[in-house]
Amino acid sequence: MDQQAKILQGRLIQIRHVATKQYLKGTIHLVIEKTMFKKKELDQYYLGTTPKEDDFYTYFILQKYQPTENDLRLGDVVAIQNYGQQQFVNLNAQKKSEVTQQCYAYLDEEKHYFVIRPEKDIFLNNQNAIDNSIDKKYVRITSIDNGYSLHSHLRTYKTESVSQYNEVTGYKNCDENDLWELLPVHENLTKGFQPQAQTLEPIQINYGSTIIIRNFWTGWTLHSHKTCYKSTKAQEISLYSYPRDENDFWIIQKLNQEDKADRALRKNHEIWIQHNITKRFLSCANVLSYSQSGYQACGLEGKPMTGLLLQEFENSPLRMNQPFVIKHLTKDLYLSQSKFQTESKIGSQQEAVFVEQFNGLCLWIIELQK
């Protein structure tokens, strides 16, 4: 595939709904909020879908949250900007959509971040390799803020000004109406468009680095704080949605440092992961988590006797935005994100657990290196 046909951040794309074959569109119509006694225009625009392919308002630009290359891949976190309106796709789980009473979708000036998720898993060769390329694949576009996926169907809006468009919403239970195709737009169709692609270089992760680790599947970050579990009295470790904060930072250390000149981290290196604020070390308790969905991930005051194993899918130095696995060295357990709220019930945070069964929620990405 030539460079123009690739899906790149900062370039124009169209987002086509798989089930209806219609294109996501930012409309020119302000959202009308209806109450029992009056109507009110909001500073937000309707999102719809249309069968018209050559529509200026069906062009979008994906902007990576932390770009290290211009290629877009499964697992990337992006903001989605409409080219016609220059506003961003948003999902608000606190409001209901006009027709189906699902999660409210709209265009707004504020950026809202989504993780590009695969239709199925991405594993190859009995889980020894992955394919995270995005070309010619169906994807789900899932908010890292609330977990709802961009969704559409054959029901049109009731509001007269947008009644020709199918409703776009957010939906949490995956079905075929959550699937989309990302299609490149040939830039000779858009005179005057200036690509936003940057000159970027891969960033290698070295031991001793202060980093943010996020889940490949959900976009949530590995997180900790001074709160302790009631059950084990160890420090609670969780997953946090957005925005990022100081409790998301960790220090990655290598157990064996024979060659001090080589600070790279590679496949099968033994590591410790230390919380930057509290200085506690990521470890696996011998008890199940509050939800019983895995073994409790906890923070210990001293360095654990046993480290964690860094498992990559390439035998090369670990880089930002490159999927990897964290495995307990002796227990044959994988660090994963639970689907359940933490024991402390702080906000919407979810459990970090160690699980026996390897799955997509066991994939991690280093998003930022200080």
Image (cartoon, rainbow, N blue to C red):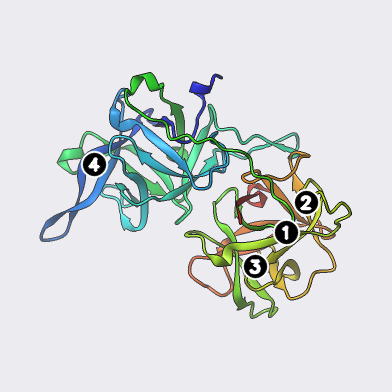
Asked if disc 1 and disc 2 are in contact, CB closer than 8 Å, the reply is yes
Left or right: 41 in relation to 320: left
Of the image marks 3 and 1, the number of the one nearer the N terminus? 1
- Give the CA separation, mark 2 to mark 3: 19 Å
The amino acid sitting under disc 1 is Gly
Residue wearing tag 2? 263
Q: Name the mark nearer the viewer: 3 or 1.
A: 1
- Give the CA separation, mark 1 to mark 4: 53 Å
Residue 278, x across and y down, in percent? 65, 74
The amino acid sitting under disc 3 is Asn
Residue wearing tag 3? 276
Left or right: 43 in relation to 81: left
- Give the CA separation, mark 1 to mark 2: 8 Å
Quadrant, the C terminus = bottom right
Residue wearing tag 1? 208
Give the numbered dot on residue 157: 4
121 and 256: which is toward the camera: 256
Q: Name the mark nearer the viewer: 1 or 4.
A: 1
Disc 2, SS: loop
Q: Name the mark nearer the viewer: 2 or 3.
A: 2
359 in relation to 350, above or below: above
Left or right: 6 in relation to 158: right
Disc 3, SS: loop
